[in-house]
Amino acid sequence: MQLRVAIVLIVLHGVDMHEVMINPEQVTSLRQARRTEHNKLFTHEAQCMIGLTDGKFVAVVESCKAVRELVEHEVSRPPDTPRRGP
């Protein structure tokens, strides 16, 4: 009997432009940066704050709209289908 296990990760970019790999199943919330007011939660480079199931937060340079599209695509993708390319 063979057991196949796959973990799907989406690749985003932190404010230092390093890759950040996130399991889309663990995303609980997205918060877009507001540029019209002083915001202590974001650096100038961060566009979106991602909340995770473990209580941690990750700030990324991608917009929340782009992150949401990636998460929804990967979560709704049937098993054994090719993943969307870059």
Image: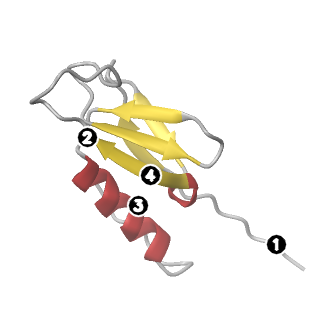
Comparing labels 2 and 1, the label whose residue is closer to the camera: 2
Comparing labels 4 and 2, the label whose residue is closer to the camera: 4
Please give the residue where the numbered disc 4 appears in the rendered image. 29
Work out how far the residue at label 3 is from the one at label 1, CA to CA, in angstroms: 25 Å
Mark 3 or mark 2: which comes first in sequence? 2
Question: Mark 2 and mark 4 in contact (Cβ < 8 Å)?
Answer: no
Q: Residue at x 50, y 35 (%)?
A: 57
Comparing labels 1 and 4, the label whose residue is closer to the camera: 4
Please give the residue where the numbered disc 3 appears in the rendered image. 71
Question: Mark 4 and mark 1 in contact (Cβ < 8 Å)?
Answer: no
Question: Mark 2 and mark 3 in contact (Cβ < 8 Å)?
Answer: no
Type of amino acid under label 3? Val
Work out how far the residue at label 4 is from the one at label 2, CA to CA, in angstroms: 15 Å
Mark 4 or mark 3: which comes first in sequence? 4
Please give the residue where the numbered disc 2 appears in the rendered image. 62
Q: Nearer the viewer, residue 23 or 32?
A: 32
Mark 2 lies on a secondary structure that is loop
Q: Is residue 40 above or below residue 80?
A: above
Label for residue 3? 1
**84 relative to 37 in the view: left or right:** right
Q: Is residue 49 above or below residue 14?
A: below
Q: Nearer the viewer, residue 46 or 37?
A: 37
Type of amino acid under label 4? Ser
Mark 4 lies on a secondary structure that is strand
Type of amino acid under label 1? Leu
Q: Position of residue 67 (x, y in %)?
A: 32, 52
